[in-house]
Image (cartoon, helix red, strand yellow):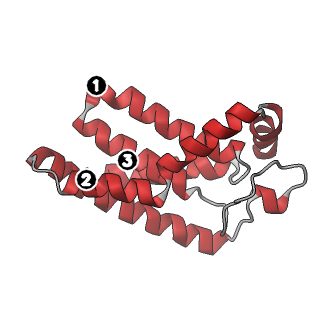
Amino acid sequence: QDRRILYLFNRSMKFRQMDVLMRIVTQLGSLPVIVLLALICLFSSSPTLAGTGRLLAVVLLCSQLIVHFLKWLTSRPRPFADLENIICGPTSAPGFSFPSGHSCAAFASAITLSSLWPAAAALLISLAVLVGISRICLGTHYPSDVLVGFIIAFGVYCFYV
């Protein structure tokens, strides 16, 4: 089932505009973007936003430690390295596939910021889901990698809240 969903997103839904969009969306879960977001919150003059920034920093740090430990433990190859007929760009992601760090970071950010801005929760969660979909479309992760990334982010968030 994992491969079937991967091929659906990676092969059946491919066209140039979608590739461009997915390459942009995937950056929302990248280290520079997530760290910048946390720093903006942390150094805000608003005590509420700064408090959310502290929570965000803790959730991101802890969830990424779990992600990288599981990557090391499982050493699952990325789809583009493991399967034939996967379409990926010239700058494919290094390292292992399971779980998705981008998806975990995007979801951790979305649920943490949703606690501050409940009215924006649907938009924030939708963007995090799009980051996960982008990782599958780009051939860098299996759907299960993305799902486990989301679960880790949610679990760590719930632990600290």
Is 112 left or right of 91, judged from the image as shown? left
Q: Amino acid at mark 3?
A: Ser
Label 3 environment density (alpha carbons within 10 Å; few <14, some 14–19, many ≥20): many
Give, as a three-letter code, the residue at label 2. Answer: Ile
Observer-nearest of 13 and 111: 13
> For the point 89% across and 49% down, which residue is it?
85
- List the residue tagged with mark 1: 119
Q: Where does the image place residue 109, in percent across and percent down from the top left?
A: 37, 47
Q: In screen coordinates, is 138 left or right of 21? A: right
Label 1, label 2: how far apart the Cα atoms are? 20 Å
Residue shown at 77% from the left, 41% from the top: 10
Task: Point out the tag, 3 or 1, that comes first from the N-terminus.
Answer: 3
Q: What is the secondary structure assignment of the residue under circle 2?
A: helix
- CB within 8 Å, label 3 to label 1: no
Residue drawn 48% across and 35% down? 127
- Disc 3: which residue: 109
Say which of 157 and 45 sits in front: 45
Q: Whole-percent x and y of residue 66?
A: 48, 66
- Residue bearing the label numbered 2: 40
Compare marks 2 and 3 and give the one earlier in the sequence: 2
Q: Residues within 10 Å of mark 1 (few under 14, many from 20)?
A: few
